[in-house]
Image: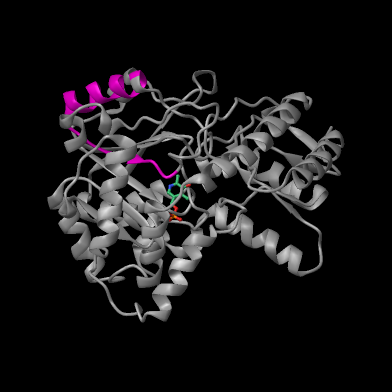
Amino acid sequence: MSLSERISRIKPSPTLAMNAKALSMRAAGIDVISFGVGEPDFDTPEHIREEAVRAMEEGFTRYTAVGGIPELKDAIIEKFRRDNNLNYERDEVMVSCGGKHVLYNLAQALLNPGDEVIIPAPYWVSYPPIVILAGADPVIVGTAETEDFKLSPELLDTAITPRTKLLILNSPSNPTGTVYTQSELEALAEVVLKHDIWVISDEIYEKLIFDDRPFYGIAQVSEEVKSRTFVINGVSKTYAMTGWRIGYAAGAREMIAGMTKIQSQSTSNPNSIAQKAAVAALNGPQDSIQAMIEAFDQRRKHLLQRLNAMTGVRCNAPGGAFYAFPNFSYYFNTKAQGTSINGSTELCEYLLDEARVALVPGIAFGDDNFIRFSYATGLETINKGLDRIEGALGKLV
Ligand SMILES: *Cc1c(COP(=O)(O)O)cnc(C)c1O
């Protein structure tokens, strides 16, 4: 059997693969601690679940408008106005089956073979494959740990060629937790306008920011920048709704129409019940977010302090999301029982086998010196996992 050439160019999501491996070890009775999960460990708030039950009971179980029900589009428009001071019309927003699906639709609607897409590394694992599946070429631009993994205007300017069509930004970032400031985004926006390229601003972690820092998105810089930017967001992370599969985009109406056309010929509308629940999430009480931030913040501080206390490990303080991205390169070129550890993949495999701790190797995010820790898990589990990691690292020579 020969699969399409397209398929051979991409790999399955390494974060989901790591999670699957940890789950299958658990199913086999092995007590695995996972720092691999990319989703909040909280329940979807009750008022949102109740709205879904109501939708079902009332028979809201049929096809809807492809790009989302008007009620949800209006809730999204209101959210952008309220939180980001951005104004959109109904034909400038659309709803898809998760933020990932929005990105997929957008890449299909925007990119041609030969187009280059600038992706700062460390990056979210799905950006390069989504670009490749659209026939375009990802251009990975490495950023420095000492610059808190931020893309500078100089790095961006140097990476742009006549083929560059798009820049993908993600703030707060998965995997680093990096949050861009207003002035940093203004400086990047200048380069974007100078070269007339498009921007995707993945703002899925917008609400998960620590130390009361304000969120700022690049589309807020000016009307001109907004017209070149597609804002991606969704309910998955903010409202602990990863399984509901609702994400949304805002941007140029021609592109939204193109994305809706693709959706109409592939998945059709997002789940009708989940759309009603998303309306309740966006329009309802927002206090569950604060409770979630407080729990994440406590874990963040604790994890950071313990990681930085480990021999050879250093970790920048993540400003948002629920990941830490420490540098573990001190342990490369070591050995344990004859196996040599030469990079993040081997180190993570060693830690899974020896310490029964699941992590995601930094190479999956475009930088082999690091390992991603998700702290979407309780403090007690975090401590137990770190104890095990310390023990296993101590055996490396
Ligand atoms: C989780 C995530 C998404 C989208 O998640 P969905 O569940 O598909 O809405 C998008 N971007 C980043 C960086 C993420 O971590």
Residue ID at (61%, 38%): 294
Please tell me which residue lies in front, 31 or 98: 98
Residue 329 lies, with reference to residue 136, above or below; the image says above
Q: Is residue 247 visible?
A: yes
User: In the figure, is residue 12 to the left or right of 20?
Assistant: left
Among all residues in the image, which is located at the extreme left?
A: 254
Which quadrant of the view contains residue 155?
top left
Residue ID at (40%, 47%): 127
Decide whether residue 132 is among the magenta residues: no
Residue 167 lies, with reference to residue 66, above or below; the image says above
Residue 43: percent from left, percent from top = 59, 58
The quadrant of the rendering that contains the N terminus is: bottom left
User: In the figure, is residue 273 to the left or right of 80?
Assistant: right
Residue 209: percent from left, percent from top = 50, 34
Decide whether residue 199 is among the magenta residues: yes
Residue 56: percent from left, percent from top = 42, 78
User: In the figure, is residue 327 to the left or right of 201?
Assistant: right
Residue 297: percent from left, percent from top = 62, 35
Q: Magenta stretch?
A: 183-204
Residue ID at (73%, 39%): 341
User: In the figure, is residue 65 to the left or right of 82?
Assistant: left
